[in-house]
Structure formats: C-alpha cells, structure tokens
Image: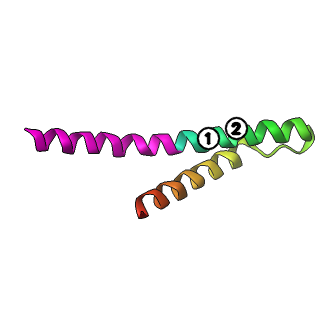
Amino acid sequence: MSTTSVVTAELVTYRYEGLDVAGHAIGTCWAVLKIRKAINPKSVALPSSLAKSAVKLAAAEMKSKHAK
C-alpha cells in the first residue's frame, strides 16, 4: 500500500509541474505585454504571437527541468 501512495503522489506532482511552468510562462508574457503597452501603445505584439511564445517557453522550461 505504501508503494502505491508514493507512486500516486509522484504522478500528481509531475502532472502539476507542467501546469506550474505554463502558468509562469503565461504570467511572464502578460507582464511583458503590459510593459510594452505602457511604453509604446502603438506597437504592441499580437496576442496570438505572445501565446505561441508562452507555449514555446513552457515547453523549453519543462524539458530543462526533466533533463536534470
């Protein structure tokens, strides 16, 4: 029974690490968007390109975390 609970805990932790990384990436992109908009409101990047870069950043962070 003890082994099962340890494996379950590890799986849940692994699952939510990905969400954590994605959340940080989206928060970072949101902050960058707000700063850029405050500095120069006419040349703000499109939200779709920011979303793509957030996904790429999250994937890169996940790969680097699991490569350790």
The image quadrant of residue 57 is bottom right
Q: Residue 27 at what x, y percent from top left?
A: 63, 38
Pointer 1 residue: 26
Question: 36 or 2, which lies in front?
Answer: 2
> Image quadrant for the C terminus?
bottom left
Q: Neighbour class for label 2 at 10 Å: few (<14), some, many (≥20)?
A: some
| Picture layout, residue 58 above or below residue 5 | below
> In this rendering, would 61 be left or right of 44?
left
Give the residue pinned by disc 2. 30
Residue at disc 1, secondary structure: helix
Q: Is residue 7 magenta?
A: yes
Residue under the image location 79 percent in, 35 percent down? 34
Where's residue 44, x and y in %? 84, 43
Q: Which amino acid, by three-letter code, is at mark 1?
A: Ile
Give x and y (percent) for residue 58.
Answer: 54, 51
Q: How many labels sit on residues?
A: 2
- Residue 7 relative to residue 24: left or right: left
Q: Amino acid at mark 2?
A: Trp
Instruction: Give the side of residue 39 with respect to residue 47, left or right.
Output: right
Q: Are marks 2 and 1 in contact (CB under 8 Å)?
A: yes
Mainly helix, strand or loop, the magenta region? helix
Give the quarter of the image for residue 16: top left
Tell me which residue sits at (20%, 45%) in the image: 7
Residue extending furthest toward the left: 1
Residue 49, numbered circle: none
Quadrant that contains the N terminus: top left
Depth check, front residue: 39 or 55: 39
**Please, what secondary structure does the residue beneath circle 2 have?**
helix
Q: Quadrant of residue 39?
A: top right
Q: How far across and down, in percent of the image, does residue 43 sit?
A: 89, 45
Q: Nearer the viewer, residue 46 or 32?
A: 32
Magenta residues (range): 1-21
